[in-house]
Amino acid sequence: MADATIAGLTEQFTKLRQRATAPLILEVDLTDGLAERPVTDVLSGIMAFRKTRLADVLEGLKRARDDDRVRAVVAKVGGSGIGLARIQEVRDAIVSFRESGKLTVAWAETFGEFAHGSLPYYLATAFDKIYLQPSGSLGLTGVAVEQVFLHDALNKAGIDFQSAKRHEYKTAADTFTERGFTGPAREAVERLTQSVAEQITQAIADRRGKTPQEARELLDRGPFLAADAKAEGLVDVLGYRDEVYADVRNEAGPDAILLYITRYYRTHVLTQKAKRLPRSPRENFVALIHASGPIKHGRSGPLGDGPMGSDTVAAALRAAAGDDHAKAILLRVNSPGGSYTASDTIWREVVRTRAAGKPIVVSMGDVAASGGYFISMAADVIVALPGTLTGSIGVILGKPVLSQLLDRAGVTTDAVSQGARARMFSTTHPFTDDEWDRINNWLDAIYADFTAKVAQGRGLTSERVHELARGRVWTGADAATNGLVDELGGLNRAAAIARTRGGLPADAPLRNYPRIGPLDQLRPPESSESRPAAAARLSFTDGWGPAWQIAARAGLPPYGPLMLPGSWTIRLWERHRCFPSDVISRRQGGVPGLGRCRHAPDDRGRKGRHRRHDQRLLPRVR
């Protein structure tokens, strides 16, 4: 009995030793999206359970490149859960890993099943080999932006809109005031789609042995059945999952072990922490602060897709600025904007941090536009992906006028007020001329402040800023050409710049900041400058908390005049969406406004013109 027990233990130890030294095949499932925000509370931890994190994938690939045990990376691709810019970050990391000479394989059950699959396929082109299930298809269908216009329907319902904006590319209200794209709107959208198409076709040309012209023709000829995709040289092998993994094991060796890349990286992190335990002084690092979601006042919501609060982000910046071990700050921005004053609060902390001598680098994700650009523009260095949506330097505000609708329905209203403009933002009556003067003075002041701070932060003349601003959205590639960002690259590139600026070695850690423990979540912070002040808060009344997207689609207010309305992530092919929530009154919560009459020569809407003529709004690209 004793001999059998000893033999069993010996066998177990032998297996453990073999597992610790065996070659590795790293795998990652990219079909269900990539989480970006760190877990800061119990609720977000539950929501993010088993969710693949972007940072883990990027850092895991970076480490695996120089790890002799790692022989290959195999990734399942497909689905539409990842935006263009984050896809480009993963592509860059795969390309860097592939340069080590190790095998990279992408496989898909389908690149869009009776749907569009241009972006998942674009991701797959970074790998050495692309496998496609024989029953699958390749939805290479190009790039399109489609917008629904509701002007005539709303006019029939007796709903009118009044608004003003700065300037002609602010298209938030076109869906309510137009019958189709206006000239500036079409100009901007055409350039956006052209830029994205150029990036996709160039990748196909570079990785699949095509000329740019051939790649462009393929974009026009899709979608393809699996056999046709292989015949065109767009995929390498038609096969099922078991055949993919069998081929990878043949390359990596029969004793190779499969391991998820997130598990691989986190095991490495724990090992490094264990090695550092005996060391007393805390090591220096780059503080990674996430600024994700619409921008609002107060504290951030706890669930990953919720809004960011200016109090939370500003407190994190203050804490990092005062931490002697945080030698540089990396601000990861993934935001369509929101409140002007909340954006300005965060901008001020960026300015203060930089003035104190602590380097601050911005890494832009899928979108960093309007208020998202506002909080970025004062950084030492701005890094964006070619597919990032950024810019939208402008402002818009307005309200719907429901008086005709209410009259038709037999609904009457009455009010008692004190103050000449107490009912200024009521939806039961249009703006007066006096109220229009106040609104336009307000928008002029915001636009002037926004563009002046862009000029100051980016070292541009005010004339040049105005040329680039006027509410226009740019891709990261075009923004770099125009000087709105400094460099093209992802989180890893931005982290490398932050390390250099902070005088840190290339392997210095990148840490989510601030690290807030369970006790910090429960007890109140000592002051507004302590780390727990940056904790998230669950709120269903301020910005609708984690249900903000559902609320917006139901007609409840979004976040403010520096906001890209609707949903803006490039996952080709996708509709250009706007929602009624983009146009409710300021009194009800403050929203992006709606545009102006075509007869108003100076971007300023007036009551009489809006009631006598069809509205013609100069566009805002979201």
Image (spheres, rainbow, N blue to C red):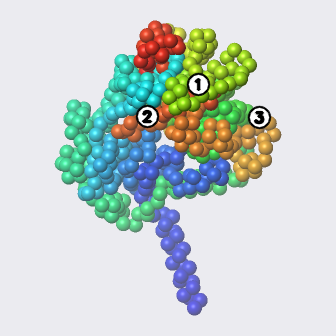
Q: Position of residue 180 (x, y in %)?
A: 35, 25
**Label pair 3/1, CB-CB below 8 angstroms:** no
Q: Quadrant of the N terminus?
A: bottom right
Residue in the image at 43% along x and 15% along y: 613
- Circle 3 sits on which residue? 528
| Kind of residue at badge 3 | Ser
For residue 387, which quarter of the picture? Answer: top left
Q: Residue at x 32, y 59 (%)?
A: 244
Mark 2: amino acid:
Arg
Estimate the x, y position of residue 312 in percent, counting from the top left: 68, 36
Q: Secondary structure at mark 3?
A: loop
Distance between the alpha carbons at the discs numbered 1 and 2: 26 Å
Of marks 1 and 2, which one's residue comes earlier in the chain?
A: 1
Give the CA distance from mark 3 to mark 2: 38 Å
Q: Is residue 98 left or right of residue 553?
A: left
- Of circles 3 and 1, the one toward us is 1
Q: Is residue 415 visible?
A: yes
Q: Earlier in the sequence, mark 3 or mark 2?
A: 3
> Dot 2: what SS?
loop
> In terms of image quadrants, where is residue 325?
top right
Looking at the image, residue 587 sits to the left or right of residue 531; the answer is left
Q: Return the residue at label 2.
A: 577
Above or below: residue 279 compared with residue 438:
below
Q: Residue at x 53, y 40 (%)?
A: 554
